[in-house]
Amino acid sequence: MNLILLGAPGAGKGTQGALLAERRGLRRISTGDLLRDAVRKGTPLGQQAKGYMDAGELVPDSIILGLVREVITGDAEARGFIFDGFPRTLPQAEGLDRLLEELGNPLDAVVVIDVPDDQLVKRLSGRRTCPNCGAVYNIYFEPPETPGVCDACGGALVERADDAAETVRRRLEVYRERTEPLIAYYERSETPVRYVDGDRPVEEVQREIVRVLES
Ligand code: AMP
């Protein structure tokens, strides 16, 4: 099964995608994670991408499509892919269609996760992560016991550079302008589009995703 999780930054695509991938034995492809990894390692890709990411802008389509092609074609064993944060533009969606057609492996569904804007801003600007063990907190919804310190390992929590308030506003604007129109693109295609209310606890949203995929 190949699936796209579509939704604004902070809608929970990463959390839901990771759960679903684990439970269904699918491979989750998060272009954001792949890019952050490249930035951390200082690879040529990371050096190209960093400026766009820090500004809340999109990394050019050709770079993203090359990256996704490399990952998909390098994982012939996968039972299917969950695309998280990709595609984000029309050329990316068209590129994915071509790639999946080449592989004879069509798209099965697009799941749109919907969360109101005020919640998105709180989720993103409140997000803190532990670089040591990967734990994720939110200063509004799930604060650590001691501010700034990871409950699990005692590491110092950090804020993602692109979660700063100004960049968050830009990322949401970019989503509305460039990515939201993809909903209409998929509605016109043969791939079913399903809608999920993402403004609920993680497990409830997960159950709803499983339900809409089975319907
Ligand atoms: P994310 O973790 O999905 O919110 O992505 C973080 C940042 O990485 C975005 O704000 C973009 O700068 C970049 N990025 C991730 N995925 C894409 C994509 N599919 N197309 C363009 N830029 C992307």
Image (tube, rainbow, N blue to C red):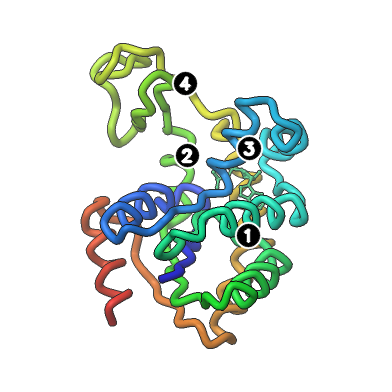
Residue 24 vertical position relative to residue 156 in the rendered view, above or below: below
Q: What element carries label 2?
A: helix
Q: Quadrant of residue 140?
A: top left
Q: What element carries label 4?
A: loop
Q: Relative to the observer, which residue lies in front, 209 or 118?
A: 209
Tell me residue 83's x, y (percent).
50, 59
Which residue is the site of mark 3?
A: 167
Residue 111 vertical position relative to residue 83 in the rendered view, above or below: below
Which residue is the site of mark 2?
A: 124
Q: What residue type is labelled 1?
A: Arg
Label annotation for residue 158: 4
Q: How crowded is mark 4: few (under 14 residues within 10 Å), some or many (20 or more)?
A: some
Q: Between marks 1 and 4, how big is the CA–CA gap?
A: 26 Å
Q: Which of marks 1 and 2 is nearer the N terminus?
A: 1
Closer to the observer: label 4 or label 3? 4
Q: Between marks 1 and 2, how big is the CA–CA gap?
A: 18 Å
Tell me residue 98's x, y (percent).
67, 74
Q: Between marks 2 and 4, how big is the CA–CA gap?
A: 13 Å
Tell me residue 79's x, y (percent).
40, 64
Q: Quadrant of residue 115?
A: bottom left
Which residue is the extreme one toward the front? 77
Q: Earlier in the sequence, mark 1 or mark 4?
A: 1
Task: Tell me if the residue at label 1 has its CB under 8 Å from ligand 1.
Answer: yes
Which residue is the site of mark 1?
A: 88
